[in-house]
Image (spheres, coloured by chain):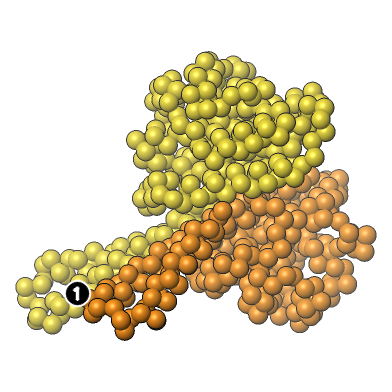
Chain colours: A yellow, B orange
């Protein structure tokens, strides 16, 4: 039902166009003069409807209302591209980091070195936007072999507001755990990439061991957080772009969901 | 920092206006002719910036990234009003209900009468929009005495897509629990309002008893879900407009977050 209206509008639009193309020479002049305005209004309505529908889809994706999805809706490719490349995404990540920073400063640390903050890596500290820009902003089905080639380059830039938050968190005296779905085999390039992008002095970088590969991200990350809690850490903050970074057992006191309308990891 | 740019633009705008007001009679004609276009562009930029900032605020609110907030940002009143009264809110609630319905149909029920779906009441089944439209769409600080007078009228309309989902869920054979932050004293009017709006045949309507009033909603609702689980129910779905409806202990297999940019209940 959701996109029915769009297709209806689209059909109307093609109807308007086909009229102009085939019949304009037989129509009386005044009607020809009226067409462009009509088409312009329909275009505007179409664009507005698309914006509404894709914003609604993004809301549903970001609030975890959708079943696991593999690709973004075809109709929303331009919307997602504009969102990621324009100011909207930057404004959103800046706001999340600011809110996280305010919370981090409001917490009284115990001073026993057991206050921890967990960060995810991809689309949280590092941006793979250069890769996704080359692969339809999430329209293409995820192809691990291709993505791993990109990871091997260790060239993902920092998400700047996340780097600022990261340094604030370290400065406040939190222990920083990086908990990523990347494979243990990628430890070298991941460290290299993180360092290149300006990230240093984390306490532990946790990657998927061979037993972890079959597990859903939510399970794998919950298990790793459970281990932290068993070691006596208090997980006060957790920053991630996926709900599978944030939900599950041993949750943090406050979780911060970074935006990511390009892919979903269950 | 978030609204600094808006105020900067706003200052620019007033500057442009003040120029026109005070100096237009001394400026040479061509300059006067150029002003309206300039002002129009600045207006458009201002409106676009406001839309970006308020959409970003709504994203942060809906993903639970903000600290508990008491009122919506002053700058976003018109944005929230347009969102709630226009098609955007309707599209969003329709999508949530549709996704929930798809999930509900995909579940194989055990047939022992222990498969349960939890619904919140306010802004999930019933809409208090007529009340909030009279109180600044969340700009006014919540005033319980005034709100209770509205509740006593039992005139909150159904959120139509939620009513449709509710009936689907019942039809599929789920046990339906209504879990609301409303007080036990309001049981009579709540039942009356729900019936008037078309809701019937729930299994249990749970309201706050006197011991529950001091508890945070997250705690109170978690305790009530714990009781359901202790009684042998499997909570498969949970629909609510607040994260305090959905997070905490005994969570549902799938949670559905309805939109609500007007108020926040921790």
Would residue A183 be visible to someone looking at this image? yes
Q: Is residue A142 above or below residue A56?
A: above
Relative placement, left or right, of B252 versus A139 is right
Residue at 78%, 60% in the rendered image? B179
- A66 in relation to A179, above or below: below
Q: Is residue A193 above or below residue A38?
A: above
- Where does residue A1 sit, x and y in percent of width and height? 45, 61
Q: Which residue is mark 1?
A: A35
In this view, the residue in front, A243 or B250, is: A243
Q: Which residue is at 88% across, 62% downward?
A: B213
Q: In the orientation shown, which residue stands out farthest toward the left? A: A25
Residue, x 38% and y 75% (percent of image)? Answer: B19
Looking at the figure, which quarter contains the C terminus of chain A? top right
Q: How many marks?
A: 1
Q: Is residue A127 left or right of residue A106?
A: left
- The crowd level at tag 1 (other Cα within 10 Å; few <14, some 14-19, many 20+) is some
Along the horizontal axis of the image, is B31 left or right of A84?
left
| Residue B158 shows in the view | no
> Residue B197: which quarter of the image?
bottom right
- Quarter of the view holding residue A129: top left
Coordinates of residue A27 in the picture (x, y in percent): 10, 78
Which residue is farthest front? B26
Q: Nearer the viewer, residue A8 or A160?
A: A160
Q: In this rendering, is residue B161 above or below A128? A: below
The residue sitting at 47% across, 67% down in the picture is: B11
Secondary structure of residue under mark 1: helix
Residue A118 in the figure: left or right of residue A157:
right
**Residue B37 placement (x, y as % from top left):** 30, 72
Give the camera-side residue of B65 and B154: B65
Q: On what subunit does the disc labeled 1 rest? A: A
State the image coordinates of residue B26 (x, y, percent, origin top left).
30, 81
């Amino acid at each position: 039902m959701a996109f029915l209206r769009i297709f209806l509008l689209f059909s109307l639009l093609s109807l308007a166009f086909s009229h102009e193309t085939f019949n304009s020479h037989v129509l009386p002049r005044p009607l020809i003069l009226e067409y462009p305005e009509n088409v312009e209004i329909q275009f505007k309505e179409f664009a507005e409807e698309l914006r509404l529908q894709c914003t609604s889809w993004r809301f549903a994706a970001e609030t975890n209302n959708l079943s696991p999805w593999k690709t973004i809706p075809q109709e929303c490719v331009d919307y997602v591209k504009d969102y990621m490349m324009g100011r909207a995404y930057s404004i959103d990540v800046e706001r999340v980091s600011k809110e996280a920073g305010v919370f981090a400063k409001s917490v009284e640390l115990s001073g026993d070195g057991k206050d921890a903050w967990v960060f995810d890596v991809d689309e949280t500290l590092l941006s793979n936007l250069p890769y996704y820009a080359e692969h339809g902003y999430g329209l293409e089905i995820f192809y691990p072999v291709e993505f791993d080639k990109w990871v091997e380059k260790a060239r993902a830039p920092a998400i700047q507001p996340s780097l600022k938050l990261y340094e604030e968190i370290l400065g406040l005296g939190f222990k920083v755990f990086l908990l990523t779905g990347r494979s243990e085999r990628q430890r070298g390039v991941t460290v290299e990439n993180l360092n290149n992008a300006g990230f240093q002095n984390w306490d532990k970088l946790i990657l998927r061991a061979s037993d972890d590969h079959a597990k859903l991200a939510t399970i794998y990350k919950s298990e790793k957080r459970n281990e932290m809690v068993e070691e006596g850490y208090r997980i006060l903050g957790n920053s991630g772009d996926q709900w599978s970074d944030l939900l599950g057992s041993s949750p943090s006191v406050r979780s911060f969901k970074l935006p990511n309308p390009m892919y979903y990891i269950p």
